[in-house]
Image (cartoon, rainbow, N blue to C red):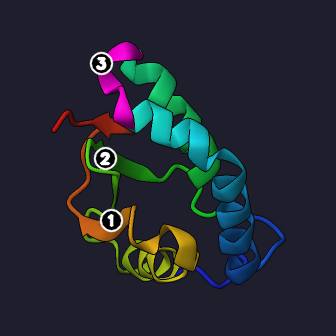
């Protein structure tokens, strides 16, 4: 299992904080993507969110749902389950009602976009 510094020099706690700071700066844009998924190319949405998630978990696999859902994928990798769980449990309070981050989905291709 990777140690807390497996994804660069910053410890995982710092990387998760950096992701949530990025998310806070970009939540309006992300909400716009989710609210109007049909107006955007899937690659644009996936690429944008992957850029943010890579701050915490490099190469993170995920799915996006139309109800403000982001499901991280572990594909059975215990380390990714633990890292994803930590990231999801640390969602800032102001987003916890609106957004649902889930850490335990089976892996699909990078950034699989689901329309709900």
Does the magenta portion include 37? yes
First in residue order: circle 2 vs circle 1: 2
- The quarter of the picture where residue 26 lies is top right
The residue range painted magenta reads: 35-40
Image mark for residue 38: 3
Residue 3's disc number: none
C-alpha span from label 2 to label 1: 12 Å
Which one is in front in this view, the residue at disc 3 or the one at disc 2? 3
Work out which residue is located at the far right of the displayed protein and give it: 9
Give the class, few, some or many, for how many residues have Cα within 10 Å of label 2's Cα (few <14, many ≥20): many
Residue 34 covered by magenta stretch = no
* Residue placed most toward the observer, 28 or 85: 28
Relative to 109, 31 lies left or right: right
User: Which one is nearer the viewer's eye here, 32 or 13?
Assistant: 32
Mark pair 1, 3: CA separation: 27 Å
For the point 58% across and 75% down, the residue is 92
Which residue is the site of mark 2? Answer: 63
Could you tell me which residue is drawn at 55 percent across and 81 percent down? 90
| Res. 74 mark | 1
Does residue 55 appear in the picture of this structure?
A: no
Question: Which quadrant of the figure has residue 65?
Answer: top left
Could you say whether the residue bearing mark 1 is in a helix, strand or loop?
loop
- Residue at horizontal 47%, vertical 42%? 31
Q: Using the image, determine if residue 56 lies above or below residue 60.
A: below
């Amino acid at each position: 299992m990777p140690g807390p510094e497996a994804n660069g020099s910053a410890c995982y706690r710092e990387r998760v904080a950096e992701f949530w700071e990025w998310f806070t700066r970009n939540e309006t844009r992300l909400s716009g993507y989710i609210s109007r998924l049909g107006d955007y190319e899937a690659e644009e949405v996936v690429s944008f969110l992957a850029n943010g998630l890579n701050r915490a978990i490099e190469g993170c696999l995920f799915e996006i749902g139309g109800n403000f859902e982001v499901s991280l994928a572990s594909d059975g990798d215990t380390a990714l389950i633990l890292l994803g769980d930590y990231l999801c449990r640390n969602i800032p309070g102001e987003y916890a009602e609106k957004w649902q981050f889930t850490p335990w989905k089976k892996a699909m291709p990078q950034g699989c976009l689901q329309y709900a």
